[in-house]
Image (tube, helix red, strand yellow):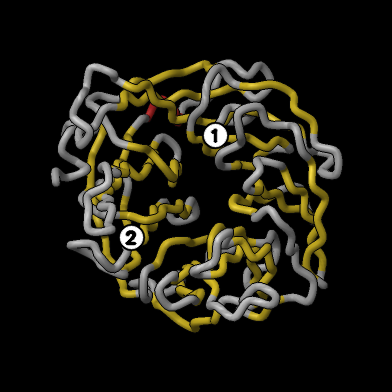
Amino acid sequence: MPSACEAVPGGTAVTCLDVEASALIADRSRGRVYALVMGGAAKYANELVVIDPESATVETSVFVGSEPDSLVLSDDATRLWVGLHGAYAIREVDLTRWPPEPGAQYVVPRGPSVSRAAYAGAMIALAGEPESIAVALHNDGVSPSGAGVAVLDSGAPRENRVDHRPAITELSSGPPGYLFGVDDQQQLVSMVVDESGLADTRVGGLFRGGAGSLVYDQGFLFTSTGHVLDVSSPDAPALVGSFSGPGLIVSHAAESRVVMLSSVDDLSVEDPLAARYELFLRRLDISTLQHDLEWVLDGRFFDARDLVEPMPGYFAFGNYQLPPYAGDDQVFVRSAVVILAAPEFAEAAP
């Protein structure tokens, strides 16, 4: 099977790293990208990989545990929390040491009345609480797998958690004291956070065509399907408009701007194993919902995920190749990390 970097042109603006990432996150305080790699990868198996976006190189990697596939940076950027699907656990990684040092490991809480082990899905750090995270829980081997959302303080669950159906699959931060989620029916879920845990209010009918992933910034909630919601009153979110198309969203250093990575399917590419998507990066004005800057990337790409901006003018995303069913009850997935050097995006918006 060809590498996920095969169609990506080399150069100073776009660099593809052969790191088979299952998840990416940015650390803006250090200007670094952290990538997790699952156990079946040819390199860096079951490791956390630290990437320098300026040089587009791997700085170091450390073993974190079995099948890492989700992560979140603490509010004060002193630690990472890593979901270990293979160990049904969450591991703390100390970022104040170099290289980062894996620490305590905590068992993921199970769903009520379910005897199977659980694993961590989406995770969000709580503002002002560096030892606390909210975690979307999933029971292994159960369909549907969702087991609600819990707040964990150094691995210990708070008493009250959101535990309803359909399952919550996406999480986002929100205004102080609130989190947001999207469930399997593409309904928005507003969650109140306090010292006892979580309570929720479900809001349906806001997403035409689904929500995808969520990003919170400056009182607004952005979805990868292009919707923009005003959540300044989190118990009564309101759809205020949509961008011109879907794409991955990341909050941006420029005031009142976000950045979107969008794709166009090149239908002339007939090989199912070949990269076929043209990608373009746009800077979007929150007030007008229009873009004021656009950059089309050279080459073709696979499925883009996990767009991050570790420092102004530098972006990274995962380039995921998912071939058709390969037989023997196995689907093969290859991925890579693509670094974008786009200095014009670091300039002040007009």
The numbered mark at residue 201 is none
| Secondary-structure class at tag 2 | strand
Q: Position of residue 82 (x, y in %)?
A: 47, 68
Which of marks 2 and 1 precedes in the sequence? 2
Label 1–label 2 contact, CB within 8 A? no
Q: Is residue 311 above or below residue 154?
A: above
Q: What residue type is labelled 1?
A: Ser
Label 1 element class: loop
Q: Residue 224 carries which label?
A: 1
Question: Label 2: how many residues lie within 10 Å, few (<14), some (14-19) or many (20+)?
Answer: many
Task: Give me the residue at 57% from left, 65% from top.
Answer: 138
Mark 1 is surrounded, within 10 Å at the Cα level, by few (under 14), some (14 to 19) or many (20 or more) other residues, namely many
Q: Nearer the viewer, residue 347 or 12?
A: 12
Mark 2 sits on what residue? 50
Residue 75 placed where, x, y %? 61, 61
Residue 267 visible in the shown view: yes
Horizontal arrangement in the rendering, residue 67 relative to residue 228 (left or right)? left
Displayed quadrant of residue 241: top right
Residue at the location (49% across, 30% down)? Answer: 247
Q: Quadrant of residue 237?
A: top right
- Residue 38 is situated, as x and y percent measured from the top left of the image, at 32, 64
Which quadrant of the rendered structure holds the C terminus? top right
- Picture layout, residue 335 above or below residue 230: below
Q: Is residue 297 left or right of residue 309?
A: left
Q: What separation in Å lies between label 1 and label 2 (alpha carbons)?
A: 26 Å
Residue 75 in sight = no
Q: Is residue 142 left or right of residue 269?
A: right
Residue type at mark 2 is Val
Mark 1 or 2, which is nearer the eye? 1
Q: Which residue is drawn at 16% across and 45% down?
A: 3
- Can you say whether 41 is above or below 17 in the image? below
